Image (cartoon, rainbow, N blue to C red):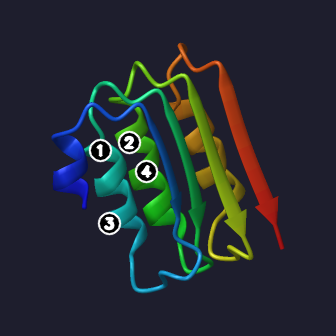
């Protein structure tokens, strides 16, 4: 999916991964990293098995998305994620970001 998305002019992506427990945080980060330069808005609902390492990888991938204007991550029952990882994700967002949503439940 990531390679196919990279070849698009996609502007908005909504991905619900709540039930995709076999998809690692690193794989989700890879998806984010391969999003096209045209991407403006990303919304991802993460499953509860995502851990600190996966969130840190996602943060690294966000750093190379300077055109991103809106980003929303939804964490539900993600007990393997620390405050530091979420703070790193926020800090990784571009200064051009106009909307940031963090939905943390559980």
Seen in the image, is 69 located left or right of residue 59? right
Secondary element type, mark 3: helix
**If you read the primary sequence from the N terminus, does the residue marked by circle 3 or circle 1 appear first?**
3
Q: Report if the CB atoms under discs 3 and 2 are less than 8 Å apart.
A: no
| Location of mark 1 (residue) | 33
Secondary element type, mark 2: helix
Secondary element type, mark 1: helix
Q: CA distance from mark 3 to mark 2?
A: 13 Å
Which residue is the extreme one toward the right?
106
| Location of mark 4 (residue) | 58
As drawn, 3 above or below 37 = below
**If you read the primary sequence from the N terminus, does the residue marked by circle 4 or circle 1 appear first?**
1
* Coordinates of residue 33 in the picture (x, y in percent): 29, 44
Secondary element type, mark 4: helix
Going 34% across and 35% down the picture, which residue do you hit?
10
Q: Quadrant of residue 44?
A: bottom right
Q: Quadrant of residue 36?
A: top left
* Camera-side mark, 3 or 2: 3
- Quarter of the picture holding the N terminus: bottom left
| Location of mark 3 (residue) | 27
Q: CA distance from mark 3 to mark 4?
A: 9 Å
For mark 1, does the 10 Å Cα neighbourhood hold few (<14), some (14 to 19), or many (20 or more) residues?
many
Q: Report if the CB atoms under discs 4 and 2 are less than 8 Å apart.
A: yes
Tell which of 86 and 19 is nearer to you.
19
Going 53% across and 72% down the picture, which residue do you hit?
50
**If you read the primary sequence from the N terminus, does the residue marked by circle 1 or circle 2 appear first?**
1
* Coordinates of residue 6 in the picture (x, y in percent): 20, 43
* Coordinates of residue 75 in the picture (x, y in percent): 69, 63
| Location of mark 2 (residue) | 60
For mark 4, does the 10 Å Cα neighbourhood hold few (<14), some (14 to 19), or many (20 or more) residues?
many
Which residue is the extreme one toward the bottom?
22
**If you read the primary sequence from the N terminus, does the residue marked by circle 3 or circle 4 appear first?**
3
């Amino acid at each position: 999916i990531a390679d196919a998305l990279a070849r698009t002019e996609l502007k908005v992506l909504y991905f619900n991964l709540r039930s995709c427990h076999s998809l690692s945080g690193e794989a989700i980060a890879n998806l984010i990293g391969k999003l096209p330069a045209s991407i403006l808005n990303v919304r991802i609902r993460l499953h509860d098995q995502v851990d600190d390492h996966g969130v840190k990888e996602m943060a690294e991938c966000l750093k190379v998305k300077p055109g991103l204007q809106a980003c929303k991550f939804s964490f539900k029952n993600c007990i393997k994620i620390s405050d530091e990882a979420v703070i790193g994700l926020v800090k990784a967002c571009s200064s051009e970001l106009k909307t940031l949503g963090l939905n943390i439940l559980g």
